[in-house]
Image (cartoon, rainbow, N blue to C red):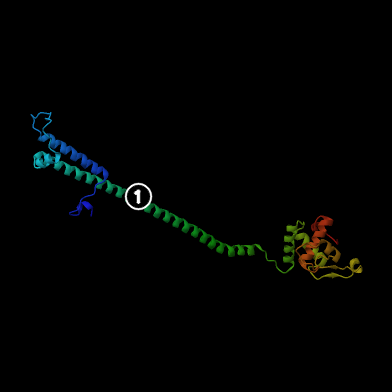
Amino acid sequence: MSASSIPGRRSRLNKTQKLSVAGISAMAVAALSFSLVPANADPKPEAETPVSAAPVVLASAAGTPQAKAVQASIIEQHSTAEKLVKAADLAKAKKAAAAKAKAAEAAKVKARAEAKAKAKAAAKVRAKAVAAERTAPQAASRSEARTPVYANNLDGWINQALDIMRAKGIPGSYDGLHRNIMRESTGNPNAVNGWDVNAQNGTPSCGLLQVIQPTFNAYHVAGTSSNIYDPVANITAAANYAADKYGSIDNVNSAY
């Protein structure tokens, strides 16, 4: 409730309103003064006749139509001024409320955007983690699938030796290896020649491709067993020696 609506309490006017009312009152006094002067009165008052004070004039003219009209005009203008002030205050309050609401909505929009961005980032991290969990066993399975399994027989030994030879750049073919193995040991990885010149010199030929120990040591292929009777180690060392001496194990058709 505003101060103007409380009974028995005067409304408080700001400086501008007070000046407006004072100005209107002064104009009213002037209007009343002029209206009370007779039309045929002498504009030059006599020196010995004193002029009546303004309050006396106002008091005597308070009930005249002119005074009532001026009073009504003052009240109306005062009411209009109050309405304008209230309207300005209301507009200002509405503008402040609208700005506050707009700021609150902007804050909500920003908060929702930030929450959405955080949720998206978290979902991305979770998706990567899930993908990694799924990929790990699959990668392991693919790795296992790429790792060949060789049979523990002459065919498996030759194929494993060929893979190692290709990785090390040692020439040779399945046919060249198989042909020489069958001639030298008939496929027995534990075969030993105890009668040739090497045996007589104390270094018998051993294994699938009948390699003597010094040759095996000199041409041993890294990554294979150091046991001369190991089928794969024996084949790769003999093929490495044949490549050095004859260009390839495929070029060997007799004792070498």
| Residue 216: % across, % down | 83, 64
Q: Quadrant of residue 58?
A: top left
Q: Quadrant of residue 213?
A: bottom right
Q: How many marks?
A: 1
| Residue 138: % across, % down | 58, 63
Secondary structure at numbered mark 1: helix
Q: Quadrant of residue 214?
A: bottom right
- Does 171 sit left or right of 28 as displayed? right
| Residue 206: % across, % down | 83, 68
Circle 1 residue = 99
Q: Amino acid at mark 1?
A: Ala
The correct choice, above or below, for 86 with respect to 221 in the image is above
Q: Residues within 10 Å of mark 1 (few under 14, many from 20)?
A: few
Res. 16 in view: yes
- The residue positioned 61% from the left and 64% from the top of the image is 140
| Residue 134: % across, % down | 55, 63
- The residue positioned 72% from the left and 66% from the top of the image is 156
- Work out whether residue 103 or residue 114 is closer to the camera in this orientation and state it: 103
Split into 4 quadrants, where in the image is the C terminus?
A: bottom right
Split into 4 quadrants, where in the image is the N terminus?
A: bottom left
- Work out whether residue 7 or residue 154 is closer to the camera in this orientation and state it: 7
